[in-house]
Structure formats: C-alpha cells, structure tokens
Amino acid sequence: MTRIVGVPLTRAAYGHPEEQGGGAPMMTSADTHSADAAIIEPNQTAFILKVTRPDEAEVSGQLMMFYVAITTSESEALTVVRRVVKADAIVEPTGVRLSQQTASALNLEAGLARAL
C-alpha cells in the first residue's frame, strides 16, 4: 500500500488525479509496505508456536515466547523453530495461524522463524 503525501484528503488521495487539476498525486516510498514481502505459496501457512524454557528470573520459573514460521506444515514449523531456540526450550503448536496480511506486515520469510 502506498501512502500519498502532499495531497489533501480528497478524491485525488484515492486515485483520482483529476481532482488536483490534472496532475498526478505525489507518491513516496517512505513507510510503504511491499505486498510481496511475505509471499505465501498456496500450500504454505504462517504457524504460531509457543516456546517455553526454564528461567529463574521469571516468577513462574518459565519464560514463554511465541514464534511464527511460514511452512507447508505445522510439523515443519516446529522443526524450523526448534533449530533457532535453545536446546532446553519446549516448542509446542498453538493451532493458531497468521493471515497473509499480517504475515506481510511482519515481513516474514518462508522457512525462517521469527519471535513475536
């Protein structure tokens, strides 16, 4: 989605340059998000996984984090996340998935894990 800068909020801001006297609206790439940042193929899904590990600094004695990975299966996502966390961490599926729009907003890449 491209943000239009320097144009009053009129029809020109929604792709109607004739409202500006015929000139095209000024466009900027600042704060612009590429829809292709996280391309999820039809057989891929962004899985959210729960990671817990012992941590004496936590009141519960456990540190809990959430990771996301774009993969073709939840078991593959578990493998991807297990590769990036410490050996004593427990990685569990949550049954939750991110939408394509959210995955793109987070600039996720297929096959990589990212902490949320």
Image (cartoon, rainbow, N blue to C red):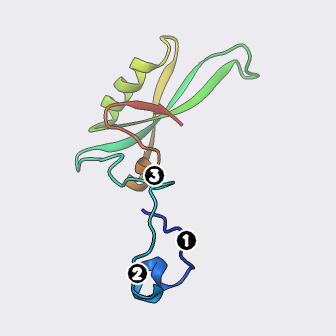
Tell me the element at label 3.
helix
Q: Residue at x 44, y 88 (%)?
A: 21
Q: Nearer the viewer, mark 3 or mark 1?
A: 1
C-alpha separation, residue under disc 2 versus residue under disc 1: 12 Å
Tell me if residue 102 comes above or below residue 58 in the rendering.
below
Q: Which residue is mark 2?
A: 23
- The N terminus appears in which quarter of the rendering? bottom left
Q: Residues within 10 Å of mark 3 (few under 14, many from 20)?
A: few
Q: How many marks?
A: 3
Image coordinates for residue 48, horizontal then vertical, percent: 45, 39
Tell me the element at label 1.
loop
Kind of residue sitting beneath label 2: Gly
Q: Residue at x 43, y 20 (%)?
A: 84
The front one of 111 and 72 is 111
Q: Which residue is mark 3?
A: 102
Q: Nearer the viewer, mark 3 or mark 2?
A: 2
Q: Earlier in the sequence, mark 3 or mark 2?
A: 2
Tell me if residue 20 comes above or below residue 99 in the rendering.
below
Q: Earlier in the sequence, mark 3 or mark 1?
A: 1
Q: Residue at x 49, y 68 (%)?
A: 4
Kind of residue sitting beneath label 3: Thr
The front one of 27 and 68 is 27
Left or right, 81 with reference to 41: right
Kind of residue sitting beneath label 1: Gly
The front one of 9 and 43 is 9
* Residue 6 badge: 1
The front one of 89 and 46 is 46
Q: Residues within 10 Å of mark 2 (few under 14, many from 20)?
A: few
